[in-house]
Image (cartoon, rainbow, N blue to C red):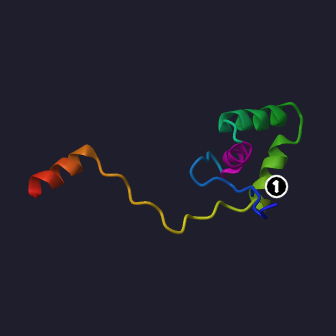
Amino acid sequence: MSGEYKRLYRARDDRMISGVCGGIAKYFSVDPTLIRLLFVIFAFAGGPGLLAYIVLAIIVPEEPVASSPEPPAKTQTEEAAEKESE
């Protein structure tokens, strides 16, 4: 084994409340809407959906911030302006 493994984090970019469903969806590579729907079904069906969400929001750490983010891509308008100024 290479020693690397997937970690469960609360998502920073795909969140509605605290990022729990987005993080679970990213971990399992599924659509976050599906995970949100499952939590709602479990909550309304008398299951532990709401309680599980609250516990996960407290226990699961937030996704770390990228140490060196890529600069935003230039728009066509910005590229055209640079060419004109040269």
Name the residue nearer the viewer: 80 or 19: 80
* SS of the residue under disc 1: helix
How many numbered discs?
1
Image point (67%, 61%), residue name: 62
Q: Position of residue 39 (x, y in %)?
A: 78, 38
Q: Is residue 46 left or right of residue 54?
A: right
The span picked out in magenta is 18-28
Q: Is residue 71 left or right of residue 12?
A: left
Q: Position of residue 30 (x, y in %)?
A: 70, 37
**In the rendered image of this protein, does residue 31 appear above or below residue 4?**
above
Classify residue 21 by image quadrant: top right
Q: Amino acid at mark 1?
A: Val
Residue at image mark 1: 55
Classify residue 4 by image quadrant: bottom right
Q: Is residue 78 left or right of residue 31?
A: left
Q: Position of residue 10 (x, y in %)?
A: 68, 55
Image point (39%, 60%), residue name: 71
Image point (61%, 47%), residue name: 15
| Quarter the C terminus occupies | bottom left
Image point (79%, 54%), residue name: 56
Magenta: predominant secondary structure element?
Answer: helix
Assess disc 1: are there few (<14), some (14-19) or many (≥20) residues with their C-alpha within 10 Å of its C-alpha: few
Name the residue nearer the viewer: 28 or 22: 28
Q: Position of residue 78 (x, y in %)?
A: 22, 51
Q: Residue furthest left?
A: 85
